[in-house]
Each structure stands twice: as C-alpha cells, then as structure tokens.
Amino acid sequence: MYSVTDPATGELIEEIENATSAQVEAAIERVHRGYSSWRLRPVAERAAIVLRAAELFAERADELAAIMTLEMGKRINEGRGEVGIVVDIFTYYATNGPALLADEPLTIKGGQAVITKEPIGALLGVMPWNFPCYQVARFVAPNLVLGNTILLKHASICPRSAAAIEQVLHDAGVPEDAYVNIFASSRQIPAILADARIQGVSLTGSENAGISVAAEAGKNLKRCVLELGGSDPLIVLDTDDMEETVKATATARMRNCGQSCNAPKRMIVLADIYDEFVDKLTKRVADYYQPGDPANPKTTLPPLASIAAADEVAAQVETAIKQGATLRTGGRRIGPGAYLEATVLTDVTPEMNAYYEETFGPVVLVFRAETEAEAIAIANDSPFGLGAAVFGTDPERNQRVARQIESGMVYLNKSGGSQADLPFGGIKRSGMGRELGAAGIEEFMNKKSIRL
C-alpha cells in the first residue's frame, strides 16, 4: 500500500493500492517506447521543456509544499525552500544542458576523433520520502535534458508528491511516455531491473536499500547511482563568534527535523572551546526547537516523517544513554503524532551503537577532540562518507583539514548544503556516483568515441 498519513496527528488520510505486475509491465513498455522518440528531439527542445517545468514548479510551490507537509511533516517554509532548489536544478540543466552535451573534439595519435554525448535509454528512479521533490529533481532534470526516459518509483508515504511532480512535468510538455510515475512495491524492483528495456537505476535511500538495489543492478549489468546514508562530521576548530557558530551548526542539524542524509550529525569540537560550545548548543536546542504544527510557519520542530521513524530514533537515543552516553537535553517521544524532543548527547564512545550508526532525526552528538589530528581521526572513523564541514577562522587551516576528511563533499563554515551547479555524492557506505553539476548529467550518458 501507498498511504498518506499525517505525521503530526497519526491520522490515515488516504490509501492507494500497489501497482499490479501488468501495470508495471505496461509502464516499462511506455518508457521504453517513449525513449525512441524523446531521444531524437533536439536538445534545445528538450531543454526548453525542462525550463518550462522549472517555471511550473515555481508557480505551484505553495501547493507542493502543502503536500509535503501533510505527507511527511516538513515545515511549510522548508517545503517552499525545497521547491526553490528544485526550480534551480531544472533551470540549471535547461540552461547549461546544451553546452554540457556538445561534442568534444579530440586530437589523437594519427588523426582526429570526437566524443559524442548521448542518452542510454529508459531509467528507473527509486526515491525517498525526506525530500520528496528535491531528490526527484536531482535525478530527473539532467536525464530528461540528456534524452533518457524515466520510470519513477517514489516512497510509499509520498504518493501525492509523486503524482503532483508527474503532473508538473507533463504540463510542461514532457511526453507521457517519457516520464511515468508507478506505485510499485519494493518487491517489484528486482523484476524491473532484470528487464532488458531498463538501462540503469538511481536510488536515494537507506544503506540496506542501496545494497539490495546495487546487487540487482550488478547482476543485470545495469548502471547504478546510489546516494545512501551519512553520519556527517562537523569539526569546529575555533571561532570568534560562538553564538553564531552554535546557531549555524544547530540550524544545519535540525533542518528537515534532522532527516537529511548530509546533515552534520557528529559535532567534533576542539577541547579549548568544547565546554562553551556544548553549553550554548544545549541551551539553544532546548529553548529554540519546540514541537508544533508543521503547517504553521512559526513552528521550529515538526514531527518526524512517521510514527515508526520517531520510535526508531527514540530507541537509538535510549540505547545510547543505557550504554553510557550523557543526555544533555531532550530525548523524549511526544504524542500524539511523530514528535521527538530535540536532543543533545555527549560522551559517546566507539563501544556504543550511536558512535557508528546514523541517527536520522533531531539528535546531535558532540565529541571532544584534544588536537586537530584527533578531530580528523574521529571524523574519518565512520563507515559513511557523504558530506562534512569544517568551521574555523583560518581559511588555510580549514582547507588543510578539509582535504584530510574522507567524504564526497566538504563545506567550510557552512554545513549540509546543496546547490544545482555543485556535484553531490559520497564514498564508502554512503553510495556511489554523483548528482548535480556537470557530473550529474554524465552518470547515465554514453560517451561515444568516433574515430574520424
């Protein structure tokens, strides 16, 4: 079942049956058939349609934000902000796509060659619930400009977002056979990937989901892009404004109720400022982040996406405390609905589950480091490698530390960001491949060498 359940109240709003095997087969045939004509449309024409989609996303921002608030509890202002970056992504690829897809001439031994940049076919997208529009945009915008077609399976708690996105794209002029939303179940994904008409898959989701999809993609020789979990470190080397540093780091962690893969989940603070940082962070988290209605723009702490998600994070916090972590503030489930108090934990050690696992909610872990080298060691002592951040007053020192962190992205004096023209992705168990920027249009591209 796909279902809409208001996480602020726990009320079931709507249920939708999963697609049948026949419906999945029909959807695959549609995007396969659609590819034969969509790929032949001039790139300028495809780009113009994607640009029109950007305009329609902007026009429907309030509608899309309200859907996200209902389905997964996103604060209404954050929902509008999410649609804003969707507009940026579609605009970026519509504007830059033709240049990114231009032939690349080569002078080679004995003559000349050219690299053409072509699509590869129909693709499967498996999308998560935490950013219902943004995650789709990262995958869809570049591939539509490139000339691939899309079969999109969204998260089971986001059927209205999925339908609204499909409507925007079709209203913009994307052919109905070039983008197809399907309410498929996870159990149907292996059969879709085994189908010869599907040429690749992009998944954003949990580590376990990534392992499963990567295994199926590998078994069937399909291209695969994975953006999985993260336990991003944020190193605070020093500061000349502790209040501002605490505000910036807390804001980055609590965005989307802590349900961001690249949020800074582990604050690593040098010893000489550790106590002050923890005291001020604890006070800000306790005082500022108060539960409320996510549809109210004044709310600072919305519910998590589901009751199950809130229970899981609360259990992680409880386990950490039992294993010896210090609870500085928060940690309690609040009902009705999927609320969890904003939480700060310290004194987490490698013997505890919380040290290595991802905590996908409004929970901050703070670590003390005696030296810069120890801070880097703690940052890298993780199975994940998505993003990271370094805060400090010396730009050269910040860059030196950033270059030693094992991750796909590092932000300096900022954290948890994303923008259309900057590649996004991780290493280790945070996934493979890149989205956004010039790299994002190349993952499902045939770079064909033509020897002249």
Image (cartoon, rainbow, N blue to C red):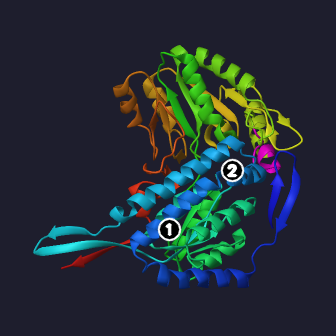
Name the side, left or right, on which 132 lies relative to 393. right
Circles 1 and 2 in contact, beta carbons < 8 Å: no
Against 157, residue 35 (above or below) is: below
Q: CA distance from mark 1 to mark 2?
A: 22 Å
x%, y% of residue 97?
40, 63
Mark 1 or 2 closer to N-term? 1
Give the residue displayed 40% in from the left and 31% down from the top: 401
Residue at mark 2: 62
Against 215, residue 134 (above or below) is: above
Q: Residues within 10 Å of mark 1 (few under 14, many from 20)?
A: many
Q: Identity of the amino acid at label 1?
A: Ile
Give the residue displayed 38% in from the left and 37% down from the top: 403
Image quadrant where residue 174 sits: bottom right
Against 338, residue 432 (above or below) is: below
Residue at mark 1: 49
Residue lying at the far left in this picture: please name it. 110
Magenta residues?
A: 302-311
Q: Identity of the amino acid at label 2?
A: Asp
Q: Nearer the viewer, residue 409 or 171?
A: 171
Q: Nearer the viewer, residue 381 or 407?
A: 407
Q: Based on the picture, tell me whether residue 57 belongs to the magenta stretch.
A: no
Name the side, left or right, on which 321 lies relative to 180. right
x%, y% of residue 144?
49, 69
